[in-house]
């Protein structure tokens, strides 16, 4: 690991901790040349997950899409970007556990709705209205009645 202060490549690890929140490893390091200390984080690189769209086309899973859709659903609901990011991590971990190589977009939507239902019911309805493509007020009312 190179030192961000002096660009020396000789550094030593002082402390290592597992960060459960985002499945990373935090390492506290010290440069052997300038003695400055700095922190690095290591994340695992999972195998690429393929999403099968409703049209039958396939695309790579993109965490950013999930984040953006949750950000819209949770807009003005008092959630910080860190809380949304944690929710995305929880959802992504569940998807990768249950669908290691390929997942249908419908299955992703169901996992998202399951999580939103426990976190914020208004966000759940917002997401469901787009995901389930309500065509009339009756479908909307039925979804609200089914929440109990």
Image (cartoon, rainbow, N blue to C red):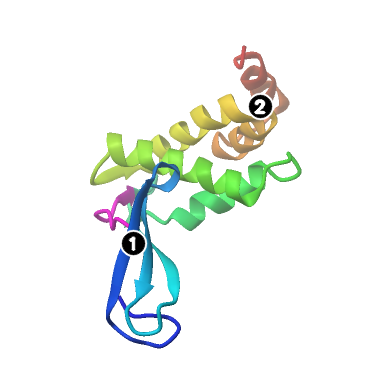
Question: Is tag 2's residue or tag 1's residue first in the polypeptide sequence?
Answer: 1
Q: Position of residue 122 (x, y in %)?
A: 70, 30
Residue 21 can be seen in this image: yes
31 to 109, vertically: above or below:
below
- Residue in the foreground of this view, choosing between 15 and 91: 15
106 vs 57: above or below: above
Residue 60 in picture, x, y percent from top left: 34, 57
Report whether residue 56 is seen. Answer: no
On-image quarter of the N terminus: bottom left
Report crowding for label 2: few under 14, some 14 to 19, many 20 or more residues within 10 A (C-alpha).
Answer: some
The image shows residue 11, relative to residue 89, as above or below, that is below
In this rendering, position of residue 118 left or right of residue 138: left
List the residue tagged with mark 1.
14
Q: Residues within 10 Å of mark 1 (few under 14, many from 20)?
A: few
Q: Position of residue 113 (x, y in %)?
A: 52, 31
**Is 132 on the left-hand or right-hand side of 105?**
right
The residue identified by callout 2 is: 121
Report the span colored magenta: 43-51
Residue at left offset 37%, top offset 71%:
30
């Amino acid at each position: 690991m190179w030192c961000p202060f002096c660009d020396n490549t000789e550094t030593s690890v002082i402390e290592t901790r597992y960060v459960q929140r985002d499945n990373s490893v935090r390492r506290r390091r010290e440069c052997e040349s300038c003695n400055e200390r700095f922190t690095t984080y290591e994340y695992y690189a999972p195998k690429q997950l393929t999403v099968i769209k409703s049209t039958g086309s396939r695309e790579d899973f993109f965490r950013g899409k999930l984040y953006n859709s949750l950000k819209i659903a949770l807009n003005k609901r008092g959630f910080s970007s860190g809380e949304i990011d944690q929710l995305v991590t929880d959802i992504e971990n569940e998807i990768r556990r249950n669908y290691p190589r390929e997942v249908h977009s419908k299955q992703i939507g169901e996992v998202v709705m399951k999580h939103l239902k426990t976190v914020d019911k208004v966000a759940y309805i917002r997401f469901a209205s787009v995901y389930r493509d309500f065509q009339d007020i009756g479908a909307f009312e039925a979804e609200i009645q089914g929440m109990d």
